[in-house]
Amino acid sequence: MEKRIITISREFGSGGRSIGKAVAERLGIPYYDKELIKQVAEKTGFDPGYIEEKGEYAPGKTFLSYFSAFTGRSDVMGGMNASDFLWVMQRKVILELAEKESCVIVGRCADYILKDRPDCFHVFVHADEEFRAERIVKLYGESDKAPRERLKDKDTRRSVNYKHFTDREWGRCQNYHLSLDSGVIGIPKCVDLIVELAGYSGEKE
Amino acid sequence: MEKRIITISREFGSGGRSIGKAVAERLGIPYYDKELIKQVAEKTGFDPGYIEEKGEYAPGKTFLSYFSAFTGRSDVMGGMNASDFLWVMQRKVILELAEKESCVIVGRCADYILKDRPDCFHVFVHADEEFRAERIVKLYGESDKAPRERLKDKDTRRSVNYKHFTDREWGRCQNYHLSLDSGVIGIPKCVDLIVELAGYSGEKE
């Protein structure tokens, strides 16, 4: 197999991001998350905070119309709305990164954007609500919203965003080479498995 | 983790059945497929061929109505149609097996039926059409239908059957602890992974 690029899609709170970072470290390759956002910010002029949020989550319609109407960026964006323009630029950055070097990319529909490259290994990480709710409170603290509501909100918006831009179902096994329940398998073991499989090249039958 | 029961759901032609058999052999536990059908046949009086086909695939409405109307089994089936009756009995056999012993169960919505048992490890095996089409021709020979049509037909019927009885989406990552692309990872490696993970009990965070 021997895959150069690993994409990790994940449910909120499942540890997909920590797993991605650890995999990149173990393989000695770059991990793209904040750095990807920085590159998209440079290409678009958008604020990194805006990209972080809107490049992966379905935006509210009202916000988008407001943004498009008042930014006066329609010249730069070729008549596209902000969300579509961000998708195009984010896609471009991801394709360029994959062309340039081995790396781990977390989120941002990278599994779909790179689906035609045979040198990619696509992973989905998920876990049950109890595991994830406990984990987000430990990592990000409490908020006004109940932990389970926060999970539901983020995942619904990721799923709607994914469907909108890819026309595929988010979290469908067939989109990934490997999918892992990090709550049952454990985060350290998920890291081991991805590292092992990405470099694995054994018999196929 | 240390799971006693392994359920394997699979796309047609992905090698899920061969993987299940090999896992059971390696772990020295029973593999339930034909044997499960035999037990359901004993409980229902249905023909094993009928159970093999209809216990996993969405049936044609016409066939079912015909069956219900002419078998005269409405007394035994408590007014249910043949398909619902088969589901109930199949479910009963699967629950009894899980209660009795460690085992591998392939297909038949066992992942859903046993979803509330914490001692189960649920796996989904899939692969791209090219890999599966080649494999079914090698294993089962040619037929009137093109290989890709045979794949599509079987998987659509499995998916409709699963949705009907479980109200869940077939092949959704979140239904399984592990999902594997056998075409990319390779069948022998899939066996290794399942054997390893089912017996694994390491740190979770």
Image (tube, coloured by chain):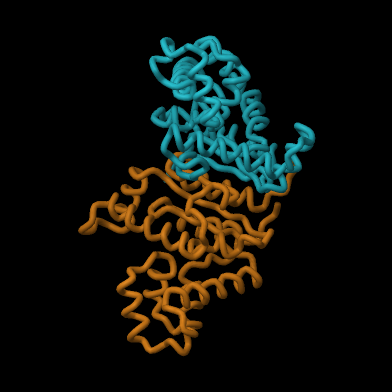
Chain colours: A orange, B cyan
x and y, in percent, of residue B171 in the image: 52, 42
Q: Quadrant of the C terminus of chain A?
A: top right
Between A196 and B6, the one nearer to me in the picture: B6
Can residue B203 be spotted in the picture? no
User: With B177 as the anchor, is A131 left or right in this view?
Assistant: left
In screen coordinates, is A204 left or right of A197?
Answer: right
Q: Could you say where residue A100 lies in the image, as x and y percent from the top left?
A: 65, 72
Total number of numbered labels?
0
**Residue A143 x %, y %:** 23, 58
Q: Residue at x 53, y 22 (%)?
A: B66
Residue occupying the point 50% across, 11% down: B43
Up-down relation of residue B155 to residue B21 (above or below): below
Q: Residue B144 or A7: which is nearer the viewer?
A: B144
Judging depth in this view, the residue of B49 and B120 nearest the camera is B49
Residue A153: image location, x then y, percent: 32, 57
Q: Residue at x 53, y 41 (%)?
A: B178
Image quadrant in which you'd find residue B193:
top right
- Most distant residue in the left direction: A144
Seen in the picture, residue A81 relative to A152 is either above or below; the reply is below
Residue A11 in view (yes/no): yes
Residue at horizontal 31 percent and vertical 58 percent from the top? A140
When the figure is inspected, residue A58 is found, relative to residue B27, above or below; the finding is below
Q: Nearer the viewer, residue A67 or A179?
A: A67
